[in-house]
Image: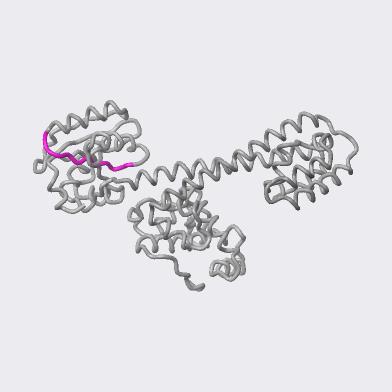
Amino acid sequence: MKRSDIAAYGVFCGIDVGKTGHYMVVLDHDGDKPLLSGSVAQDEAAIREALTKAGDIGGRMLVTVDQYGAFGSLTVAVAKDMGLDVAHLSPRKFKQVAEIYGEDKTDAKDAFIIADASRSMPRHIELVGERPEIMAEIKVLTSCRDDTVRERTRCYNRLHDLLHRACPALDKVLSKQKLHNGLEICLVERYGGPQGLKRAGKTRVAKWAGSLKYCKTRGPKLAETVFEALSKQTVTLPATTVIEAQAKKVAKRIIELEVEEKELDAELERLSEQMVEVEILRSIPGVGRVFGATIAAEIGDISRFADAHHLASYAGVAPVKKESSTIKKSRKRKGGNRRLKNAFVQSAVIAAFREGSAEETYYKKKIAEGKTHQQACLALARRRVEVVYAMLTNGTYYEPLPVAA
């Protein structure tokens, strides 16, 4: 914010956000003695009461917090509902400002620093608008999408196990990625397994499969292949009836999860259009709608990272050095933001297998140096962090880096 923007406010409320409670300090435009201070519970009624008391002091009030997401989301929501302007002092900028006030650290002092910085150093704070809400929504959606994908993977594994128990030959026909096709999963959802298919008969199954959209030719061919596999097994394996009933349920759940994922992707697309960072990130090879939204939301304000190395450490893709006298080596970092790390690594893997790309050349270079596939992908992800940091800092689109870089 600019100093001219601050002139419109007469009261400055600084809130040091905590998990179970906050500390609030209220200052006027000139005095150093708090007009109001005290602890506030992490409760809507308590927050509303405290902000009402602060507002009664007189003058237009600016509420400044050190966290507008996670623990601070309730405070921000209540303040906005009351029609108050809310600003944010990022952790990195708070650390810079706090050095001026000495080394002591208490909740009361932190709240005072936040309030005082908002009136005397407005360049360090930013108004909380719609952007944080969009980022919060994207985080929720990407988290739900991750859960959906994981559950679908578990269901696929479970379904393969059930089909193998009922008829190994049928499981072989629907092995690996074949079961991920719409026709195959619908076949299992409708008939369950060998008994259900045999009761229906090849003619009826072929007619049904051919009636599905885009399956006029492939449907009857699949029915022919399936019944050829069933003819190789003349015995009925134990618990086949129960297995087929469960297979139908699991297949139905997989179809439901596919629909859920598409709905989540559509919502992510809608929200991504409102964030310029996602558009910038999607210019990077391997970064699509989901990875772009995930990276943008998990990073948030790029200015909170001093440089690309800090961002790499936060993402968990920077190696940890271990040196002592004659020993010099590095190991994989165990911490970091796992969702952000996954987005960096998975997008790097996709780009590495695009023929003729700079990422493919870099990946092959690392493999030639003796790196494993995982190490090469991590190295590419670390290199990608440099690119993302520069792009978001400068607001520029992707340009391939030289291979030797």
The boundaries of the magenta stretch are: 58-68
Residue 13, relative to residue 388: is it above or below? above
Q: Is residue 67 a member of the stretch shown in magenta?
A: yes
Count the labels in the image. Answer: 0
Outermost residue to the left: 30
Question: Which is nearer the eye, 281 or 27?
Answer: 281
Residue 405, relative to residue 339: is it above or below? below
Outermost residue to the right: 234
241 relative to 183 in the view: left or right: right
Q: Is residue 136 a member of the stretch shown in magenta?
A: no
| Picture coordinates of residue 243, whole percent (x, y) | 76, 32
Q: Looking at the rendering, which quadrant does residue 397 occupy? A: bottom left
Q: How is the image coloured?
A: one colour
Residue 348, relative to residue 119: is it above or below? below
Question: Which is nearer the eye, 352 or 100?
Answer: 352
| Picture coordinates of residue 296, whole percent (x, y) | 42, 53
Residue at coordinates 23% horizontally, 50% vertically from top-left? 97
12 relative to 245 in the view: left or right: left
Residue at coordinates 60% horizontally, 38% vertically from top-left? 256
317 relative to 154 in the view: left or right: left
Residue at coordinates 34% horizontally, 48% vertically from top-left? 131
| Picture coordinates of residue 218, whole percent (x, y) | 75, 52
327 relative to 66 in the view: left or right: right
| Picture coordinates of residue 399, whole percent (x, y) | 45, 69
Question: Which is nearer the eye, 258 or 396?
Answer: 258
